[in-house]
Image: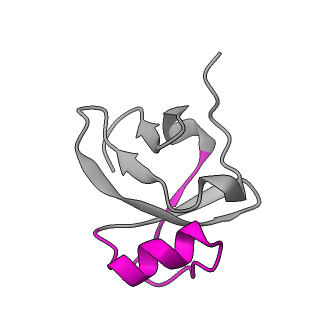
Amino acid sequence: MARRTLTPADEGKRVLNVDGTEVGRIVSVEDGRGYVVPDPSMTDTIKAKLGWGDVTAEAHPLDEGSIEEITDDAVHLRGVL
């Protein structure tokens, strides 16, 4: 069964729409909810991978119901963000 629950280990992963288009990166995970920043800067990406990501006004919340599968390098959505 595919994993659909986000953990802090998923911070920094790419987020892909159902068609494979990259829409952003997970910058933070809080209480199982991820926050996606579209087109983050290199600094934001590195901070997220180190667990130092910040939830900003441009971050979109992402919950388990929107996730099709979480792999080693990406979060695959059921639809589009």
Span colored in magenta = 39-63
Which residue sits at x=63%, y=80%?
Answer: 52
Residue 50 at what x, y percent from top left? 62, 72
Which residue sits at x=48%, y=54%?
Answer: 13
Residue 22 at what x, y percent from top left? 27, 50
Which residue sits at x=32%, y=79%?
Answer: 41
- Say how the picture is coloured: one colour
How many numbered circles are shown?
0
Q: Is residue 17 left or right of residue 32?
A: left
Q: Is residue 75 above or below residue 60?
A: above
Depth check, front residue: 45 or 54 = 45
Residue 24 at what x, y percent from top left? 34, 60
- Decide whether residue 80 is among the magenta residues: no
Q: Is residue 20 above or below residue 51?
A: above
Q: Is residue 48 above or below residue 12?
A: below
Residue sitting farthest toward the right = 31
Residue sitting farthest toward the top = 1
Which residue sits at x=48%, y=75%?
Answer: 46
Residue 26 at what x, y percent from top left? 50, 61
Q: The N terminus appears in which quarter of the rendering?
A: top right
Q: Is residue 33 above or below residue 56?
A: above
